[in-house]
């Protein structure tokens, strides 16, 4: 006959507790699964609607108008906001503007501020006056006006008086002395002809100097890209090479190009062409006969548009490279005057790059040539600005006859 063993009370209590925990866990899992199912079935709340008429008003603003929602997402903006690099996609590019928008959303107080913002990926700066106000319960409106012109006027006035008065004295004095020489040699037809040719050379140099001074002052003194358009940098590079082909042929210098298609930026096509043309012209002027000058347009780091001009010339000493973008600065004064250089070409390149939100850099070694690189933000750039060291390229070989991987 079998007998049932008696379970110890302590063991029974332990087993009961374990069973209770297991049942509780299963119940919690069932509740969570039910909650998730309910949440999945619940419709996503729609985005808050824009106040009536706001989109139409922002679309016709000449200044930058930006509307952000409660999650800092740009839901509407004027075309100028994109052209000036304030908006990329649905994000505010500059943290200063984002900070203002958040502060206004937090307390509902209208704020005004003058800000100095980074312009694109380069060293250029954009001075703006921002007015930020709440618009309804869910949106914040930013009105941003470019004040860069006013900030530059005083600086340009000082620099213009200091530099121009000095630079104009040389050709004007030369023409005056040559005119006196012509008068003294009026009985010598050969001497008169020789002096007349010199006067013509100095006159051309004076004309070029005045033209470049006016162009540089225009670039520094105002935001010349008032109505930026979508431009093809590759087409600008081809145009610049065509402009320089005649003088390159005279010096028996071969121009070669490597251009990627679809490299587009917002800006002024004529200014970009002028900048590239200045780099090509310098490369030709400082290269020896029988060498090559290469022009490359491609997408560099993070989609940045790189325009590089490489020569097989004399090269630039390291101590000179920090100053070559200064106005009127010449590395080789004697050679610059012999080639008609004014010392303004690279300064114009720098300001064109700045005005397009980019930068310009140089790689060079004496005896191995130079590579000048313009970096420009592409039209479809991402929102983040990531400053980094300028991209440089190795110069073309100086003492070999092999062409680089580019096409003529």
Image (cartoon, rainbow, N blue to C red):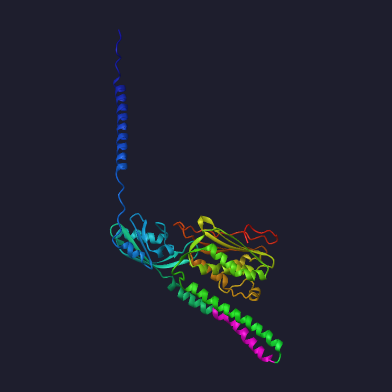
Q: Is residue 171 left or right of residue 113?
A: right
Where is residue 130, by image quadrant? Answer: bottom left
Q: Is residue 280 left or right of residue 20?
A: right
Q: How many marks?
A: 0
Would you say residue 9 sits in the magenta stretch? no
Percent position (x, y) of residue 381? 47, 58
Task: Please tell me which residue is depicted at 48% across the width and 57% down the height of the picture.
Answer: 386
The kind of secondary structure the magenta stretch mainly shows is: helix
Residue 370 in sight from this viewpoint = no
Above or below: residue 17 compared with residue 383: above
Percent position (x, y) of residue 33? 32, 37
What are the residue bounds of the magenta stretch? 163-186
Quadrant of the drawing holding the C terminus = bottom right
Would you say residue 176 sits in the magenta stretch? yes
Where is residue 329, by image quadrant? Answer: bottom right
Above or below: residue 285 compared with residue 404: below
């Amino acid at each position: 006959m079998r007998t049932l063993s008696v379970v110890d009370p302590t063991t029974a209590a332990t087993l009961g507790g374990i069973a209770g925990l297991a049942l509780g866990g299963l119940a919690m899992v069932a509740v969570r699964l039910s909650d998730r199912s309910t949440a999945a079935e619940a419709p996503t709340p729609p985005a808050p609607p824009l106040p009536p008429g706001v989109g139409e008003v922002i679309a016709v603003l000449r200044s930058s108008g930006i509307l952000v929602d409660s999650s800092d997402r740009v839901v509407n903006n004027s075309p100028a906001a994109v052209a000036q690099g304030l908006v990329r996609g649905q994000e505010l590019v500059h943290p200063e503007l984002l900070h203002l928008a958040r502060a206004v959303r937090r307390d509902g107080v209208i704020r005004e501020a003058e800000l100095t913002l980074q312009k694109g990926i380069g060293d250029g700066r954009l001075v703006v006056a921002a007015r930020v106000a709440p618009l309804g319960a869910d949106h914040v409106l930013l009105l941003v006006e470019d004040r860069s012109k006013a900030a530059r006027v005083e600086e340009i006035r000082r620099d213009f008086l200091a530099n121009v008065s000095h630079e104009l004295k040389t050709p004007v004095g030369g023409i005056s002395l040559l005119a006196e020489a012509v008068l003294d040699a009026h009985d010598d037809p050969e001497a008169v002809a020789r002096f007349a040719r010199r006067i013509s050379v100095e006159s051309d140099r004076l004309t070029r100097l005045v033209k470049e001074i006016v162009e540089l002052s225009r670039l520094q003194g105002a935001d010349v890209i008032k109505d930026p358009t979508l431009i093809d940098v590759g087409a600008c590079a081809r145009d610049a090479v065509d402009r320089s082909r005649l003088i390159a042929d005279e010096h028996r210098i071969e121009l070669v190009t490597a251009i990627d298609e679809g490299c587009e930026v917002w800006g002024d096509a004529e200014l970009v062409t002028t900048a590239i043309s200045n780099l090509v012209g310098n490369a030709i002027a400082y290269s020896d006969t029988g060498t090559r000058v290469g022009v490359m347009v491609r997408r560099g780091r993070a989609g940045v548009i790189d325009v590089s001009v490489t020569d097989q010339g004399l090269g630039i000493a390291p101590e000179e490279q920090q100053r070559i973008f200064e106005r009127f600065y010449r590395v080789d004064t004697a050679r610059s005057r012999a080639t008609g250089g004014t010392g303004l070409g690279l300064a114009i390149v720098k300001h064109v790059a700045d005005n397009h939100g980019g930068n310009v850099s140089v790689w060079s070694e004496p005896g191995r040539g130079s590579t000048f690189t313009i970096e420009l933000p592409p039209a479809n750039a991402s929102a983040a600005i990531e400053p980094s060291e300028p991209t440089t390229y190795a110069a073309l070989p100086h003492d070999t006859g092999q062409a680089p991987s580019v096409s003529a």
